[in-house]
Amino acid sequence: MIINYNSVFDQIQVAERALRLWSNDHILQLIRQNYQVILPLVFRALEINSSHWNQSVLKLTQNVKKLFQNIDEEFFYR
């Protein structure tokens, strides 16, 4: 059971770190320049994470989705 808990904890940490990358200024600039390519690649994962049980991962996912909505709302809802 401890091994399983550590595995889940590690996965959450990886998810949190990956989602925090989206708030990096350089990454944001690249996203704004290439959102029409990036969004289709990550949209499914963002949708899956939208029902994540971990509140930190859920909040970070919502922030990334809001980022894409703010860049181009019409493209986001296609």
Image (tube, helix red, strand yellow):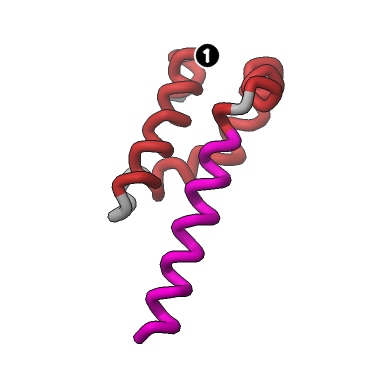
Front-lying residue, 38 or 3: 3
Question: Could you tell whether 28 is left or right of 77 in the image?
Answer: right
Where residue 38 appears, x then y in whole percent?
A: 64, 31
Q: Which residue lies furthest to the bottom in this view?
A: 1
Residue denoted by label 1? 71
Give the tally of numbered discs: 1
Q: Which residue is drawn at 50% across and 51% down?
A: 15
Asked which secondary structure carries label 1, the reply is helix
Q: Residue at x 57, y 31 (%)?
A: 22
Where residue 7 appears, x then y in whole percent?
A: 47, 73
- Magenta region includes residue 53: no
Main secondary-structure element of the magenta-colored stretch: helix
**Region rendered in magenta:** 1-21
Q: Residue at x 42, y 37 (%)?
A: 60
- Magenta region includes residue 13: yes
**Toward which corner of the image does residue 61 lie, by quadrant?**
top left
Where residue 5 appears, x then y in whole percent?
A: 38, 75
Front-lying residue, 24 or 77: 24
